[in-house]
Image (cartoon, rainbow, N blue to C red):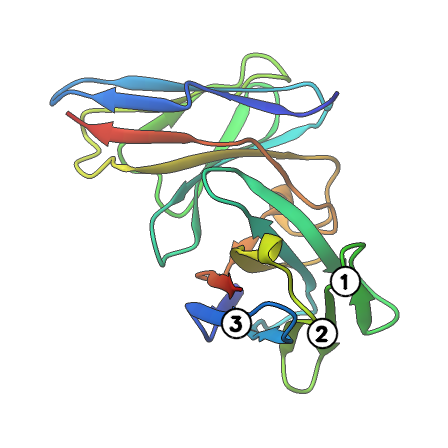
């Protein structure tokens, strides 16, 4: 079984400042890792994913995440945030061959970008 | 455009009443899922289905039921046995097996008690 911990429930940040959202996972097997974003009253949208290969993955809107196997982490970063990045962010894991392609989610980090 | 449609957007339940949440997808995905979202708790899996006419319980299935009679449809019934049904419910789907396929989500149904 896997578990995911997002260490910060809320992160206030000023516009154009950098932000880092922390995600740690626990698993007895290798994992696939995902970050999703949720805007108010909407579903989740995939931001980026790590399946294999390069440990640094990037999204089209400037976010990046780095897989660190030794620290079992997959932290999300953006060097300069915009007001439109205000949302809740979820880290999730799945295991290769997982029955039903199931995901395990962290508790979420709410990002509030202030002008 | 392909996607997942959940309806209604808002739903109210009276005491002792069963209510059904609709989820339809036109992505031709085999697998479908129902999650419950409560503030600060992330998403918790209620039920999932890998193929038509088959489904499995997730982590919090008590008080809920599902059916999967068609590939594109996966309705969730919140029964009167669910004593704390107030939450945001999300439906998702994914293609293939193996854990490496991302899930695609609908825009959710918010259920409240009258």
**Mark 2 to mark 3 CA distance (whole Å):** 12 Å
Return the mark for residue A13: 3
**Closer to the camera in the image, A112 or B25:** A112
Q: Secondary structure at mark 1?
A: loop
Q: As drawn, which residue projects farthest toward the top?
A: B69
Categorize mark 2 by other alpha carbons within 10 Å: few (<14), some (14-19), many (20+): few
Q: Which residue is mark 1?
A: A62
Q: Residue at x 77, y 62 (%)?
A: A62
Chain for disc number 1: A
Categorize mark 3 by other alpha carbons within 10 Å: few (<14), some (14-19), many (20+): many
Return the mark for residue A87: none
Whole-percent x and y of residue B44? 42, 48
Q: As drawn, which residue projects farthest toward the left?
A: B15
Horizontal arrangement in the rendering, residue A108 relative to residue B86 (left or right): right
Q: Residue at x 35, y 24 (%)?
A: B10
**Closer to the camera in the image, B88 or A29:** B88
Whole-percent x and y of residue B74? 52, 21
Vertical comparison of B31 with B13: above or below:
below
């Amino acid at each position: 079984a896997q578990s995911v911990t997002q260490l910060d429930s809320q992160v206030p940040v000023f516009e154009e400042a950098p932000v880092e959202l922390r995600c740690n996972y626990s698993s007895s097997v290798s994992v696939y890792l995902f970050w999703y974003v949720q805007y108010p009253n909407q579903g989740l949208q995939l931001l980026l994913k790590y399946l294999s290969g390069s440990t640094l993955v990037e999204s089209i809107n400037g976010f990046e995440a780095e897989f660190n196997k030794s620290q079992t982490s997959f932290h999300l970063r953006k060097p300069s945030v915009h007001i439109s990045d205000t949302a809740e962010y979820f880290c999730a894991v799945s295991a290769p061959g997982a029955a039903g392609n199931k995901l395990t989610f962290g508790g979420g980090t709410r990002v509030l970008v202030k002008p | 455009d392909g996607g997942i449609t959940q309806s209604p957007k808002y739903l109210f339940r009276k005491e002792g009443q069963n209510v059904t949440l609709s989820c339809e997808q036109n992505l031709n995905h085999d697998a479908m899922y129902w999650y419950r979202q409560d503030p600060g708790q992330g998403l918790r899996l209620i039920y999932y289905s890998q193929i038509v006419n088959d489904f499995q319980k997730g982590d919090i299935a008590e008080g809920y039921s599902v059916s999967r009679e068609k590939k594109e449809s996966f309705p969730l019934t919140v029964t009167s046995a669910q004593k704390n049904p107030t939450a945001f419910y999300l439906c998702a789907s994914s293609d293939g097996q193996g854990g490496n396929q991302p899930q695609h989500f609908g825009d959710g149904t918010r259920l409240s008690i009258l």
